Image (spheres, rainbow, N blue to C red):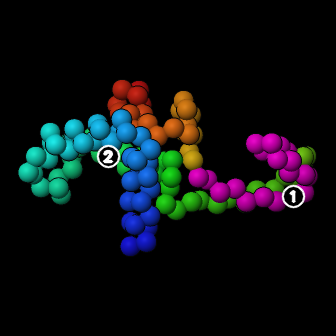
Amino acid sequence: ADTTAATLANVLLNLSRNSEVQAKLREELRAELNGADWADDSRCDYLNWILYENQRLTPTLSVSHSRSAIEQDVEIEGFLVEKGSTVSLVHRRFAMGVDDPKSFKPERWSDEEKA
């Protein structure tokens, strides 16, 4: 229940920060689910893209990996990790090799964007 609540809170936060995304979602929901059963979301591509993008940008559960600088000093995003040090990296935003990875862009999940 906590992860569901956190995910919904993040979705609402991302939608509140992106009015154009919110408007597109509203259009899709009105067009595709006009009185239909919400259990069938297969027609709502944009909704699914929003959920994927939400998990990419603001994942509910983060993944942590420990790494050591064994052979030499290493710089990670401006931070010096001295040789012999161990750091724990927490993945929060997955860049996935996409343009503008800090922006909330559900369209990046469309077939045209992924191609």
Q: Residue at x 28, y 41 (%)?
A: 25
Q: Left or right of 36: which side holds 9?
A: right
Return the residue nearer the eye: 25 or 80: 25
Q: Nearer the viewer, mark 2 or mark 1?
A: 2
Residue occupying the far bottom of the picture? 1
* Residue marked by disc 2: 48
- Tell me if mark 1 has few (under 14), some (14-19) or many (20+) residues whose alpha carbon lies within 10 angstroms of its own: some
Amino acid under label 2?
A: Asn
Q: Residue at x 40, y 47 (%)?
A: 16
What numbered label is drawn on residue 85?
1
Magenta stretch in the rendered image: 74-92
Task: Give how far across and how far down residue 69 sits, in percent.
Answer: 84, 52
Mark closer to the chain start, 2 or 1: 2
Amino acid under label 1?
A: Ser
Give the structural element (helix, strand or loop) at label 1.
loop
Q: How many marks?
A: 2
Q: Is residue 102 visible?
A: yes
